Image (cartoon, grey):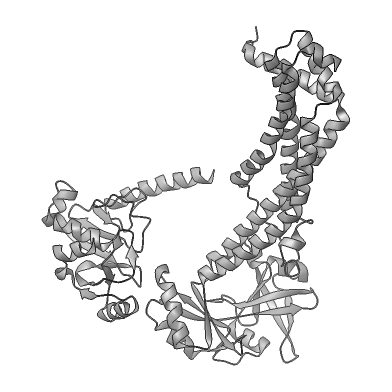
Amino acid sequence: MKRVLSAWAGIALLLLSTAAVAEEPARRPTRTDKCPVCGMFVSRYPDWTAAVTFQDGTSAWFDGAKDLFKFLAEPGWFLPGKKAADIRSVTVTDYYAVKALEAKEAFFVVGSDVFGPMGRELVPFGKRAEAEEFLRDHRGKKILRFADVNRAVLDGLD
Amino acid sequence: MKRPRPPPWLERQRYLLDFTLSSLGRRKGKNLALAALYTLVVFGLASVLMFTQALRGEALRVLEGAPDVVVQRLVAGRHDLIPGDRVERLSRIRGVQEARGRLWGYYYDVSARANLTFLVPDRFWGKPGEVVIGEGVARTRLSRPGEPFPVLAADGEVVVLRVRETIPSSSELVSSDLVLLSEADFRKLFGVPPGLFTDVALTVPNAKEIATVATKIRGLMPDTRPITHAEIARTYEAILDWRSGLVVLVLAAALLSFGIVAWDKASGLSADERREIGILKAIGWDTSEVLTVKAWEGAVVSLSAFLLGLLLAYVHVFVTPAPLLAPVLKGWSTLYPDFRLTPTVNPFIVSTLFLLTVVPYTVATVVPAWRAATTDPDAVMRS
């Protein structure tokens, strides 16, 4: 009975969220949203969620900053028809506050002992001081900005 | 209008079941005793399982609102009041979103002969001098909104507060013994000086960071003890598992003796029953028909006993306040004079019980019947 109810609630939420897309990009992934890079359900990892919002108001969701950067390197490969020019905004989830954060303003720590759903991760922070403390606490290696993340960094994480 | 005839297979089962029931009626004493014993065992097991399941549900509901980390100050190994400046220092720890000093405590109410929990909520919506009380408190002290609520303060003075309202709640366990009041009244009642708190509750948004925060607190304030959400949950689980294990252990003896009796009754065919099978075979029954009757017999006895036991257990746990189990399992029985558990039936528990009781019993009745039915009817009747 409970499962039936929650299924209906899920459907209702789904309808609500598709209705909301028309006006404003959805803030949260729904239960059926999959990461276009790895294919995993994103809503199970709210503290890792990263998002790309396109010019037409639709969004793509990722279960970590690593997959987000892989997507940004070649959007058309993962979502045929999408180009870098279609992207309106890119957000990641702040590790300490668990809130959405503009990816271009984030500080990413690599090499730490904190793992995401896809293993080694770029852990995002809003402030440099936070990133530095996290690096000390969790034996991180380096702090990177958005522009520093390239192919070599991503290959080093896999 | 002609009534449609049921399919022949179903018709046949109906006649066989009819025969089974009258055959059961012929050995009333034996079957009733067996069914009663059976019902008792199912009742005992189902009561324990349902009760612990319901208590676990209540505990989870309590935990839902619990803070991520609670920081207590210890003096000589005992819980002590924590100074307010610690709240600010704790909130500066990376990963902590908010730190709140909390004021709460227990008060032994002589007139109700129960322990009440006094708590200053985040934002108390009443005026100073007013209290908001739980259903259990209202019941035992017979206080209704608008009435005075006298409390004996720490300095011996009787402070008369006024009841503003009672808290309606989905789970009585959470709020039954609760008394909410303003900070000023709390400090006056218990003699807690300004600037001191009972403990500090922290909000840590990222669950992965809780362990790191706890480690930092231990380094930063060696005289405190951080208690995480997971630790509280583990303690609840351990206590419940330990207690229900204890009861199941006691029941294990009953279960074992039931097993022996049931096996003996079901598997050993009496001379009477053997003769009956022999006669049935002699008048032309198939072995398969004899087995079907025996399977029906086992199913009728065990299924009705199972359903009756389950129903009794449900009534015992959720309708009456579980008089047989509460003293052992609840442990708060003195604090909560009367609290009802939220009724839940876990399909997992029901199917486990079903597989453990009905299925083996039915099988146990069929096997000896098969042995008797496959031998020559003449030999069976003569022996």
The vertical placement of B282 against B230, above or below, is above
The C terminus of chain B - image quarter: top right
Q: Residue furthest right?
A: B29
Along the line of sight, which residue is nearer the eye, B6 or B109? B6
Image location (x, y in percent) of residue A22:
26, 50
Q: Residue at x 12, y 56 (%)?
A: A84
Name the side, left or right, on which B351 lies relative to B216.
right
Along the line of sight, which residue is nearer the eye, B86 or B226? B226
Tell me if residue B170 can be seen: no
Along the line of sight, which residue is nearer the eye, B238 or B226? B238
Name the side, left or right, on which B62 lies relative to B28.
left
Image location (x, y in percent) of residue B288:
68, 16
Which quadrant would residue A7 be assigned to in this image? top left
The vertical placement of B113 against B46, above or below, is below
Image location (x, y in percent) of residue A98:
35, 68
Q: Residue at x 74, y 23 (%)?
A: B369
